[in-house]
Image: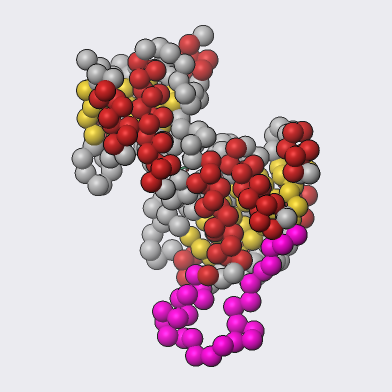
């Protein structure tokens, strides 16, 4: 009987699917994630692994676990895994695309509105007993109707965020992407632009790119200085895409207007991080895919990837299909 180790508790839908397929399932029981050594020790006894985006599955980890027949990441992003080493070792890697598209785009949209309408800062003023009068000039936000949305990474989630913003606010869509998307250009009257044009023209920038060497810290001092002073920056992809010190400086000195982040670097962010005390920032703890249904569907796909991988079949979300060639 093949053994599967799951590095955190995930929704039952995934665990039951594995058990129904006749697999032996071991789940990390503690609410505190395993440290690297614990993860190594538990994985060494397994034929297959379901890991989290916070588990570092690097080259040395993989070389110590060549018995693994498949690894399934409980996330769509897979920057935590050394894919080229896994492929060299013949280990198929799975992820969970599609099922989290809507939830993640919904969250980016929520952050955009929360920043635009100063929801967190104005709520804080009540909690701190600072609301004394109705203020004609208090907490003035940004209108979004007809404004320009710049998407970085026009994949599934970027496209859904664009659709939401266009439906709700008739926003004009521009995007920066490595690939042209003629069908999107036509459907949304969207326009592919250079990174510089996107920075200069957008009223809201929403980041949906994967993290790689080309996207690491692309939002840095130089980039923030090219943005409009009224611009809102939203990041629901990976914290390493923006430089946190440069972002803080841009927000604190009025270089840009506000930011909504679901991702930080590092994660978790510490409670005394100075970004948290800025009035024009809304930060959530990497919860964009955290709805009951979405997390259950992610668990199902993660389990199905394991079952398929153990049978040497094509995974549902298949990061390195070349592994079978
Ligand atoms: C992912 O799946 O990569 C997301 O970041 C999870 O919310």
Q: Is residue 103 above or below residue 40?
A: below
Identify which residue, 151 or 101, lies in the foreground: 101
Percent across and percent down for residue 194 are: 77, 43
Location of residue 234 by image quarter: bottom right
Residue at image position (25%, 47%) is 31
Percent across and percent down for residue 207 are: 60, 48
Percent across and percent down for residue 89 are: 41, 15
Q: Report the residue that reaches farthest toward the top.
A: 325
Quadrant placement of the N terminus? top left
Location of residue 184 by image quarter: top right
Residue at image position (32%, 34%) is 13
Q: Is residue 232 left or right of residue 25?
A: right
Identify which residue, 10 or 222, lies in the foreground: 10
Color theme of the render:
secondary structure
Residue at image position (50%, 46%) is 103
**Circle count:** 0
Most common secondary structure along the magenta stretch? loop
Percent across and percent down for residue 141 are: 63, 72
Q: Is residue 66 above or below residue 293?
A: above
Q: Report the residue that reaches farthest toward the bottom.
A: 133
Residue 57: in sight, yes or no? no
Residue 273: in sight, yes or no? yes
Residue at image position (21%, 44%) is 30
Q: Is residue 23 left or right of residue 181?
A: left
* Magenta region, residue range: 120-146
Q: Is residue 258 above or below residue 196?
A: below
Instruction: Tell whether position 229 is magenta.
Output: no
Q: Is residue 13 left or right of residue 105?
A: left
């Amino acid at each position: 009987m093949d053994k599967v180790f799951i590095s955190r508790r995930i929704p039952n839908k995934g665990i039951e699917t594995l058990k129904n397929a006749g697999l032996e399932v071991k789940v990390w029981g503690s609410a505190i994630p395993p440290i690297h050594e614990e993860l190594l020790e538990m994985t060494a006894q397994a034929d297959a692994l379901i890991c989290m985006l916070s588990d570092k599955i690097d080259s040395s980890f993989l070389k110590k676990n060549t018995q693994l027949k498949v690894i399934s990441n409980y996330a769509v992003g897979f920057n935590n895994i050394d894919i080229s080493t896994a492929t060299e070792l013949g280990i198929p890697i799975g992820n969970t695309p599609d099922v989290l598209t809507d939830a993640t785009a919904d969250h980016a949209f929520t952050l955009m509105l929360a920043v635009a309408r100063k929801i967190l800062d104005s709520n804080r003023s009540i909690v701190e007993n600072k609301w004394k009068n109705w203020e004609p000039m208090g907490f003035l936000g940004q209108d979004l109707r007809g404004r320009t949305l710049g998407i970085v990474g026009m994949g599934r989630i970027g496209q859904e965020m664009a659709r939401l913003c266009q439906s709700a606010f008739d926003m004009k869509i521009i995007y920066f992407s490595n690939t042209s998307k003629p069908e999107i250009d036509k459907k949304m009257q969207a326009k592919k632009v250079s990174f510089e044009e996107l920075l200069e023209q957008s009223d809201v920038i929403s980041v949906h790119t994967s993290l790689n060497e080309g996207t690491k810290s692309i939002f840095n001092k130089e980039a923030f200085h090219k943005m409009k002073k009224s611009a809102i920056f939203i990041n629901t992809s990976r914290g390493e895409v923006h430089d946190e010190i440069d972002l803080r400086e841009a927000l604190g000195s009025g270089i840009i207007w506000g930011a909504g982040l679901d991702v930080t670097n590092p994660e978790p962010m510490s409670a005394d991080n100075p970004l948290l005390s800025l009035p024009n920032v809304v930060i959530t703890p990497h919860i964009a895919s955290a709805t009951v249904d979405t997390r259950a569907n992610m668990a199902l796909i993660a389990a199905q990837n394991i079952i398929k991988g153990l049978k040497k079949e094509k995974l549902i979300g298949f990061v390195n299909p070349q592994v079978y060639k």
